[in-house]
Image: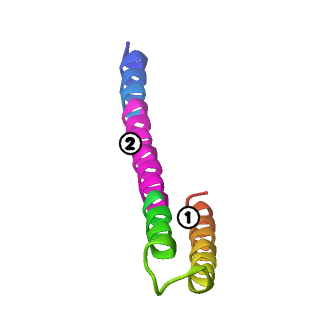
Amino acid sequence: MIVDLELQKLYTEKENIEYAAERRINLYISLIFLASLAQLLSFYYMIFHVDWLGWDIIEPITYSVQQLTVLLSIRFFIRNK
């Protein structure tokens, strides 16, 4: 009887942890999607709709932003294992 109560406590704690982890994962996925969409739309606007900005100017910027994104992703995965 006591073991069953302890197991029930552990199962509810496990469910709470899994729920919090799922919410955090969904938050990260949403943030990554929104950041990627904002990056795509902003670069599209800068390349095709701003007259004084062309691909010659935007290409190094897009390359640098992508490299920064990769470095931040690597740091995130190293930190969170």
Residue drawn 36% across and 20% down?
A: 5
Magenta includes 71?
no
81 or 6, nearer to the observer: 81
Compared across the picture, whether 23 is left or right of 61 comes to: left
Quarter the C terminus occupies: bottom right
**What is the quadrant of residue 54 in the picture?**
bottom right
Q: Which quadrant is home to the N terminus?
A: top left
Q: Position of residue 26 (x, y in %)?
A: 43, 44
Q: Residue at x 43, y 39 (%)?
A: 22
Q: Is residue 60 above or below residue 42?
A: below
Residue 23 badge: 2
Secondary structure of the residue carrying numbered label 2: helix
Tell me the SS state at disc 1.
helix
Q: Residue at x 62, y 79 (%)?
A: 59
Residue 2's label in the rendered image is none
> Does the stretch in magenta take in 19?
yes
Residue 38 placement (x, y as % from top left): 42, 63
- The foreground one among 56 and 27 is 56
Residue located beneath label 1 in the image: 76
Tag 1: amino acid: Phe
Stretch of the chain drawn in magenta: 14-36
Q: Which colour scheme is used?
A: rainbow
Judge the density around disc 2: few (<14), some (14-19), many (≥20) Cα neighbours within 10 Å.
few
Q: Distance between the residues labelled 1 and 2?
A: 17 Å
Query: Toward the viewer: 69 or 75?
Result: 69
